[in-house]
Image: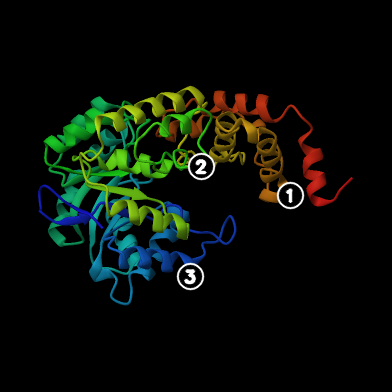
Amino acid sequence: MLYRKVPKTGEELSILGFGAMRLPMIDSKTIDEEKAIAQIRESIDNGVNYVDTAWPYHGGKSEVIVGKALKDGYREKVVIADKLPQFLVESREHMDEILDEQLKRLDVDCIDYYLIHAVEGNSWDRCVELGIKDFLDKALESGKIKYAGFSFHGVPEDFKRIVDAYPWTFCQIQYNFLDTENQAGTSGLKYAASKDLAVMIMEPLRGGNLSAPTPPDGVQDIFDEAEIKRAPVEWALRWVWNHPEVTVVLSGMNNDDHIKQNLAIAAEAEANSLTDAELAIVDRVSARYKELMQVPCTGCAYCMPCPVGVRIPGCFELFNSAHMFKDKAEHLKYQYAVLLSKEMAGESAYASQCVECGQCEEHCPQHIAIPEQLKRVVDYFEQDNMQTKVNALVGRS
């Protein structure tokens, strides 16, 4: 495992962090607790020392699982990152109540790296009005948190002013070879680093879209031109780690093979290790992906729950996949019909159920016009008789 230093403290953090947003599941509602704990501990045993969770992950259960995983001496081997859900905060006092509940869920006395979750310009201004700076000052002084930071989902201009608004130790941004100009982007990465902030990276694989073993049409041909052959996931992760401004890359690892693969890459991915020719290849791959990808959704699920039951990330994932992997289009149409049916999902979750209330759009970090994009999903997937496919699955005529 390679490590990089936090500029303001000198603390060494593993370049690979364990993100507890997408833990292994038994079914759509139940975390496979035994497996999740084993995966977190395996990662720590192999050098990971940064574990990231948040209040809304898995409906509040992620924090509890992380707390359990860090028993038996594992707490002393890692730092914990957790987040204040500013979008739920009602008052200055409420901030204290949430932090105390998080300490209880994790069963710890201190959260090492504490972030204001998913801020952008307007939400930051609201946080300031509610007393966020006083909250952070008091939480640091009391020892309930060790370092203060924020995760960001907005535009570059707001990112820079938030960086300058408080003496942060670190920040967290979305960054991958498709998002060099989206949200904080490369300019934000460099600006935060210039202010001596550690920068933690989320969505390095863009919700897994950049790690498919069989890339979309044309992508593999570009990768094959490289002198050193690598899997798509390695190209994506190495590209992020190639930036010396990056401190930790978070991976939502919930597959044993993926964990081993990520750990292996994190043992070798030095900053500034990609050649100019290799960087040019990644630039071309990025351009090809942008030609194919229909909706810039990362699957973060901040748009959920939908009040009428649409599984928005699932709809977009299948829609993007159908366009990127055209040889699987018919199978993906079958998946859409079946997986989002009442019979499989418990409640019907199709894009056509959207009533354009706009609630999802308000919370989307990618600023996607979700209702309009859902109409495209309907046009693509719901023109055939979907119920026939569902009936075939459940044995109805």
Cα–Cα gap, marks 1 and 3 = 28 Å
- The answer to the question of whether label 3 and label 2 lie on touching residues, with beta carbons closer than 8 A, is no
**Which of the numbered marks, if any, corresponds to residue 304?**
2
Judged from the image, the secondary structure of the residue bearing numbered disc 3 is helix
Q: Residue furthest bottom?
A: 72
Q: Residue furthest front?
A: 227
Q: Is residue 307 left or right of residue 388?
A: left
Q: Sequence-wise, which precedes: disc 3 or disc 2?
A: 3
Relative to residue 228, is residue 370 depicted above or below? above
Cα–Cα gap, marks 1 and 2 = 21 Å
Q: Is residue 265 left or right of residue 210?
A: left
The residue under the point 62% across, 39% down is: 308
Q: Sequence-wise, which precedes: disc 1 or disc 2?
A: 2
Q: Sequence-wise, which precedes: disc 1 or disc 3?
A: 3
Instruction: For residue 235, say whether it is visible.
Output: yes
Judged from the image, the secondary structure of the residue bearing numbered disc 2 is loop
**Which of the numbered marks, if any, corresponds to residue 343?**
1
**Residue at the disc numbered 3:** 34
Kindly identify the amino acid type of the residue bearing the numbered disc 2: Met
Residue 127, image quadrant: top left
